[in-house]
Amino acid sequence: MILILLGAPGAGKGTQAEKIAAHYNLNHLSTGDLLRTAVAEGSELGRLAKGYMNKGQLVPDDVILGIIRDYLDEHAGVSVLFDGFPRTVTQAEGLDGLLKGDSVRTVSLEVDDEQVIKRLSARRSCRVCGKIYNTALGINPAPDGRCTCGGEIYQRDDDQAETITSRLMIYHDQTEPVISFYRGKGLLIEIEGTGSPDDVFGRIREVLG
Ligand code: AMP
């Protein structure tokens, strides 16, 4: 089974993906996390991706599809949760070509732009384990200001105000058509993404069973 989690930046994909993967026992692949790790390690992929990511732009489709092809080869027959992929119709079509009869379901988290800006401005992440904190959602770090794993909590470069605007524009322009793509195939489940993470997860469980 392949489960795809779609939604604007800040819609809550990372938070819900952790819950969904644990509850339904899925392998969670966040392309954003994978790319941030590559950037931190200074690998060839990281050097290529860094410029796009810092400007809030998408990494080229062929690079992303190469990552997904390798991942699916290594995880043949395993149920996977994609978080942050596909981000363009070209990626969605590329994924179709890589799947071998797997059943696909797509969950889209619906949050308006005003909420997105509020959430992304308040979002912080752990540099070590990637855990997400957000004062706008009441997900606060411990009083010592560190992650539960002890890691440093920081603000992502692409969560700065000027980059948020361009990420949102790119989302409307390039990623929203992916929602229509899956709607057209009858594979789309739309979930209201406002409210607490537990409320949203409750809605997801109601439809996924
Ligand atoms: P995210 O953590 O999902 O918000 O992703 C952070 C950044 O990584 C994005 O703004 C893009 O620059 C890049 N990225 C992540 N996933 C993809 C993807 N599927 N296609 C292109 N770029 C991506």
Image (cartoon, rainbow, N blue to C red):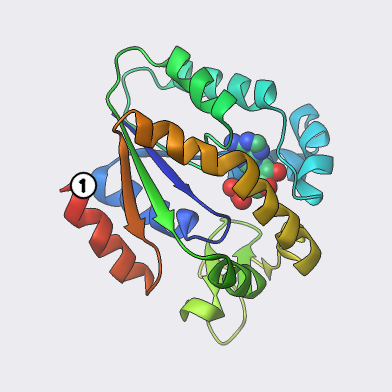
- Position of the N terminus, as image quadrant, is top left
Where is 71 relative to 59, above or below? Answer: above
User: Along the horizontal axis of the image, is 201 left or right of 177?
Assistant: left
Q: Residues within 10 Å of mark 1 (few under 14, many from 20)?
A: few
User: Along the horizontal axis of the image, is 70 left or right of 198?
Assistant: right
Q: Quadrant of residue 16?
A: bottom left
Q: State whether residue 34 appears in this view.
A: no
Q: Quadrant of residue 96?
A: top left
Disc 1 marks a residue whose amino acid type is Leu
Q: Quadrant of residue 159?
A: bottom right
In percent of width and height, residue 89 lies at 55, 29
In percent of width and height, residue 18 lies at 40, 53
Ligand 1: image quarter: top right
Where is 101 relative to 105, above or below? Answer: above
Where is 151 relative to 83, above or below? Answer: below
Q: Residue at x 67, y 20 (%)?
A: 62
| Residue that badge 1 annotates | 208
Q: Residue at x 31, y 69 (%)?
A: 198
Q: State whether residue 138 appears in this view.
A: yes
Number of numbered labels in the structure image: 1
Residue lying farthest left?
209
Q: Residue at x 81, y 32 (%)?
A: 48
In percent of width and height, residue 160 lies at 76, 66
Q: Secondary structure at mark 1?
A: helix
Q: Residue at x 46, y 13 (%)?
A: 97
